[in-house]
Amino acid sequence: MSDAGEIVLSTARLFFTRFIPDDAPFVVRLVTDPDWIRYIGDRGVRTDDDARGYLERGPIAMYARHGFGLWRVARREDGLPVGMCGLIKRDTLPDVDVGFAFLPAYRGLGYAAEAAAATLALASERYGLRRVVAIASPDNVRSLRLLEKLGMTPEGTTPNADPDDPTVLYARAL
C-alpha cells in the first residue's frame, strides 16, 4: 500500500507509515509550504538531500529513541501522501506532543482532525501516555480550533518562549 513500509496506524480514510529517506521529495513540498514556514518555522530544507537529513535527524531518529515520531499520512484510496502527524518528544517540553501538518490542497477536508484524533488514541493505547500536549502559533487559528475540537485546553505559552514569537501550549489528559 505504501513504499514507506509497514502501516503504523490507519483510519477510515488515512494510513500512517514511518518516514523513510525516499520520502524526501514529499517532505520538501510540505516543509517549504509558506504556511509551514509561517506557523512552524523554516527548517532550512530546500532540496531532497536537505529533506533526507531532516528525516534522519528528526522522525527517523525519534523512532529509534522512543518508538514513535512524526509519521507520513497518506490517503487509503490511492496511497497519495497528504501530510504528517504523530508524536514528538521535545527536550523543551515535559510531555510528548502531538504534531500535524498537511499540504494546502488537503486542508479543510477533516484529514488533520482524523489523523490527530487517531494519534491521541494511539498515544494512550500503545504508548501508555496519560497526558499529551500540543504547541501552536497564537495566530494559527485553524490549528488552535482543531486542538480545542480534540479536547485540548490552553495552558499559556511554552516554557522559554520567545517573547517576540510566543507559542501557545495546549494539553489534554488521556
Image (cartoon, rainbow, N blue to C red):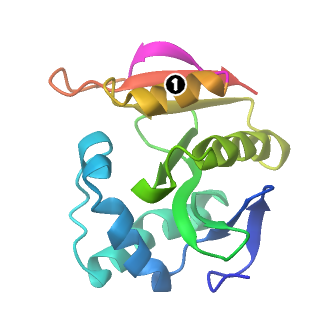
Q: In this view of the protein, which residue sits in the foreground, 107 or 3? A: 107
Asked if 22 appears above or below 102 in the picture, the reply is below
Residue 19 seen anywhere in this rendered image of the structure: yes
Percent position of residue 92, x then y? 40, 36
Residue 93 seen anywhere in this rendered image of the structure: no
Q: Residues within 10 Å of mark 1 (few under 14, many from 20)?
A: few
Q: Residue furthest right?
A: 125
Q: Quadrant of residue 131?
A: top right
Residue at 36%, 23% (x, y): give it.
159
Q: Which residue is disc 1 drawn over? A: 145
Residue at 67%, 21% (x, y): give it.
151
Q: Main secondary structure of the magenta part?
A: strand
Q: Quadrant of the C terminus?
A: top right
Tell me, yes or no, whether the highlighted magenta stretch contains residue 27: no
- Give, as a three-letter code, the residue at label 1: Arg
Q: Which residues are magenta?
A: 151-158
Residue at 30%, 47% (x, y): give it.
35
Name the secondary structure under disc 1: helix
Percent position of residue 59, x then y? 50, 64
Q: Residue furthest left?
A: 164
Asked if 20 appears above or below 127 in the picture, the reply is below
Q: Quadrant of residue 162?
A: top left
